[in-house]
Image (spheres, helix red, strand yellow):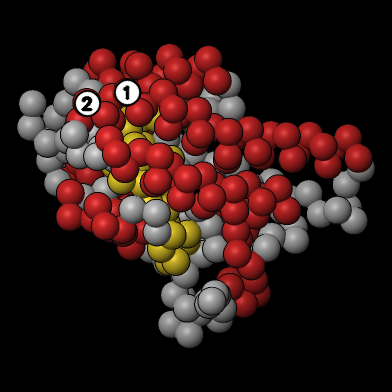
């Protein structure tokens, strides 16, 4: 088989779809993962250049479904060389605006999807990545892991945890030739972001960056593709900020 085998969670739209298209354009075989948006996922799959691609489904918050999904992807692709943990949820739950039951439910769902999900997908993918010889894991985090997310605190906390998880795995998996890195975007021009940036809010969000714009999905995809490349082994353990200087950390 030509190219590499790449599993991308949450790739039925937005950033994940752009990442899938980027790998496929390089001649890689891609497993497009979705939770419930099958129609969108099928459209992404149909639009990928090249061949050997496949569609897989699972709620990444469901540990058993994750194991089944990873095995299906590996069987269809002939292994897994690259894993991109992109699937995530963001739901507003300001501490001053929700009741206790809602608060607990939002934290549970967000952590199970954004942190435990990538941890479980990675665990299930590691046997396949080890056989690859040049395995790569790229986690998609967020600027919110560093600056905080007051309207969605569980999201910010989950992404901070994802950063730490990636660094732990970078050390743990290096002896097997597996490099692990993370990208941390700010606002990205997706359908979901456009809804959140409606009206005057759009100008405010663009003004956060001195470039006076938000990221394009292809910019995030290009960074992911580099970190997944054979040349990027020495970037293992890194967290790459992709926010157009809208938030600078020390």
Provide residue 7's location: percent of width, then percent of height: 32, 33
Q: Position of residue 186 (x, y in %)?
A: 51, 64
Q: Nearer the viewer, residue 126 or 142?
A: 126
Secondary structure beneath disc 1?
helix
Q: CA distance from mark 2 to mark 1?
A: 7 Å
User: Which residue is rendered at x = 50% and y = 28% of the image?
Assistant: 120
* 11 on left or right of 60: left
- Is 212 situated above or below 170? below
Which mark is on residue 127? 1
Residue at the limit of the structure toward the front, as seen here = 175
Question: Could you say which quadrant of the image residue 70 lies in?
Answer: top left
In the shown orientation, is residue 107 left or right of residue 65?
A: right
**Labels 2 & 1 near each other (Cβ < 8 A):** yes
Q: From where the camera sits, is residue 44 visible? A: no
Which of the two residues, 58 or 173, is positioned nearer the viewer here? 173
Residue closer to the observer: 233 or 45: 233
For residue 127, what is the image quadrant?
top left
Neighbours of disc 1 within 10 Å: few (<14), some (14-19), many (20+): few
Q: Secondary structure at mark 2?
A: helix
Give the number of the disc on residue 131: 2
Please report the residue visible at 43 percent of the width from the left and 82 percent of the height from the top: 211
């Amino acid at each position: 088989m030509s190219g590499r085998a790449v599993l991308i969670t949450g790739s039925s739209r937005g950033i994940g779809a752009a990442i899938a298209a980027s790998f496929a354009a390089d001649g890689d075989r891609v497993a497009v993962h979705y939770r419930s948006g099958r129609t969108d996922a099928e459209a992404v799959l149909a639009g990928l250049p090249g061949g050997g691609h496949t569609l897989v489904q699972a709620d990444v918050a469901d540990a058993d479904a994750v194991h089944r999904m990873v095995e299906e992807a590996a069987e269809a692709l002939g292994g897994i060389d690259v894993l991109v943990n992109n699937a995530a949820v963001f739901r507003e739950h300001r501490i001053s605006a929700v009741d206790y039951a809602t608060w607990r439910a939002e934290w549970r769902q967000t952590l199970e999807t954004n942190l435990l999900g990538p941890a479980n997908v990675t665990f299930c993918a590691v046997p396949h990545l080890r056989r690859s010889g040049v395995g790569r894991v790229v986690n998609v985090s967020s600027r919110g892991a560093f600056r905080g997310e007051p309207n969605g605190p569980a999201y910010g906390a989950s992404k901070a945890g994802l950063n730490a998880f990636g660094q732990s795995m970078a050390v743990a998996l290096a002896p097997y030739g597996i490099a692990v890195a993370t990208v941390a975007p700010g606002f990205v021009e997706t359908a979901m972001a456009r809804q959140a940036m409606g009206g005057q809010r759009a100008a405010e969000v663009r003004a956060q960056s001195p470039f006076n714009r938000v990221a394009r999905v292809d910019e995030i995809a290009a960074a992911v593709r580099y970190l997944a490349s054979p040349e990027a082994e020495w970037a293992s353990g890194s967290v790459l900020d992709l926010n157009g200087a809208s938030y600078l950390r020390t």
